[in-house]
Image (cartoon, grey):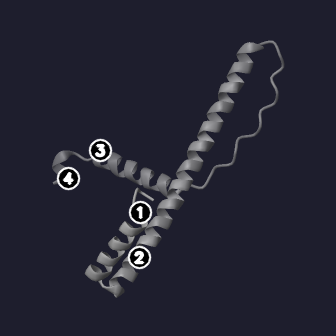
Amino acid sequence: MFGIGGMELLVIFLVALIVLGPKSLVDISRTLGKVMGEFRRVSTDFQRTLNTEAAREDENQRKKETASAAPDAAVPPQSPASPPTTPTPLDRAVAKAEAESAAGESTPPEAKA
């Protein structure tokens, strides 16, 4: 676990307990657990999105290869487009940042001050 052995982890915990106190340590641990859970959810959504896009790109590449290899052969019917996915928290954050960036660029410099 990050190159930290059991004894080092115990020393870190004891120092944190002495410095922060038992009540603060519980609150900090709870907050840290929530942050780690949210990070795990966002990273899982991000990984799922990357895997979906990679699979979609591979499928498109295979379709192009089969189309160029046999131009006279009948093209099999394409599957309908996948339904739109629900935006992840990462997607929403990126869209918000892009919107704020676009809004900031369209405002003249003297209006910003």
- The Cα–Cα distance between marks 1 and 3, rounded to whole angstroms, is 53 Å
15 sits to left or right of 47: left
Single out the mark in the foreground, 1 or 4: 1
Q: Quadrant of the N terminus?
A: bottom left
**Judging from the image, what secondary structure is the residue with disc 4 in?**
helix
Residue drawn at point x = 73 percent, y = 18 percent: 67
Of labels 3 and 4, earlier in sequence is: 3
Residue drawn at point x = 41 percent, y = 54 percent: 96
Of labels 1 and 4, earlier in sequence is: 1
Residue drawn at point x = 57 percent, y = 47 percent: 49
Mark 2: few, some, or many residues within 10 Å (few <14, many ≥20)? few
Of labels 1 and 3, earlier in sequence is: 1
In this figure, which residue is indicated by the disc labeled 3?
106
Single out the mark in the foreground, 2 or 1: 1
Mark 4: few, some, or many residues within 10 Å (few <14, many ≥20)? few
Q: Give the image location of residue 98, x and y in percent.
A: 39, 48
Q: Give the image location of residue 48, x and y in percent.
A: 59, 49
Q: Give the image location of residue 38, x and y in percent.
A: 49, 65
Of labels 2 and 1, earlier in sequence is: 1
In this figure, which residue is indicated by the disc labeled 4?
112
Q: Is residue 108 above or below residue 1?
A: above
**Judging from the image, what secondary structure is the residue with disc 2 in?**
helix
Residue drawn at point x = 65 percent, y = 36 percent: 56
Q: Is residue 36 above or below residue 31?
A: above
Mark 4 is on which residue type?
Lys
Of labels 2 and 3, earlier in sequence is: 2
Is there a contact, CB below 8 Å, between mark 2 and mark 1? no
In this figure, which residue is indicated by the disc labeled 2?
29
In this figure, which residue is indicated by the disc labeled 1?
5
**Judging from the image, what secondary structure is the residue with disc 1 in?**
loop
